[in-house]
Image (cartoon, helix red, strand yellow):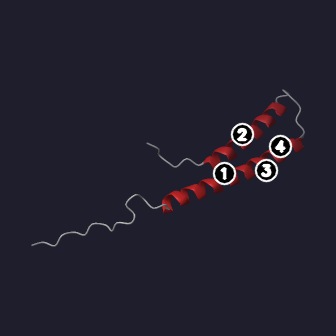
Amino acid sequence: MLRHEFQPGRLVAGTFLALAGIIYVGDAGDAWQTPWLVVIPLVVGGLFLAGVAGAVTRGIRRRRRSAPGPNHDTPPPQPEAPH
């Protein structure tokens, strides 16, 4: 059982921000040289993709909630009056 809803937008944002952090750690540890300008498009692009993923997810969830079920046309059963 899930404890919360899966939110792919947050997953995408977290992945890109973690990647930016790894790039900076590698640069700080002298594993490689990274120009400072490289990380800005990475973070902005990741946030853009996260926004798109969040909007698509919201649209899908709204459509599923508003879709009629198999017994949507039948009225709910009425309780019987006591005799």
Badge 4 amino acid: Val
Q: Is residue 76 above or below residue 20?
A: below
Q: CA distance from mark 1 to mark 4?
A: 21 Å
Mark 3 or mark 2, which has the lower sequence index? 2
Q: CA distance from mark 4 to mark 3?
A: 9 Å
Residue marked by disc 2: 18
Picture quarter containing residue 21? top right
Q: Nearer the viewer, residue 52 or 2?
A: 52
Q: CA distance from mark 2 to mark 1?
A: 18 Å
Q: Residue 53's mark?
A: 1
Q: Residue 44's mark?
A: 3
Q: Is residue 13 above or below residue 81?
A: above
Q: Residue at x 72, y 49 (%)?
A: 49
Q: Residue at x 68, y 45 (%)?
A: 12
Outermost residue to the left: 83
CB contact under 8 Å: marks 1 and 4:
no
Residue neighbourhood size for the residue with mark 1, other residues' Cα within 10 Å, grouped as few (<14), some (14–19), many (≥20) = some
Residue neighbourhood size for the residue with mark 3, other residues' Cα within 10 Å, grouped as few (<14), some (14–19), many (≥20) = some
Q: Secondary structure at mark 2?
A: helix
Residue marked by disc 4: 39
Q: Nearer the viewer, residue 9 or 56?
A: 56
Mark 1 or mark 3, which has the lower sequence index? 3
Badge 2 amino acid: Ala
Badge 3 amino acid: Val
Mark 4 or mark 2, which has the lower sequence index? 2
Q: CA distance from mark 1 to mark 3?
A: 14 Å
Q: Is residue 41 above or below residue 71?
A: above
CB contact under 8 Å: marks 1 and 3:
no
- In x, y percent, where is residue 31? 84, 26
From the viewer's perspective, tell me whether residue 69 is left or right of residue 42: left
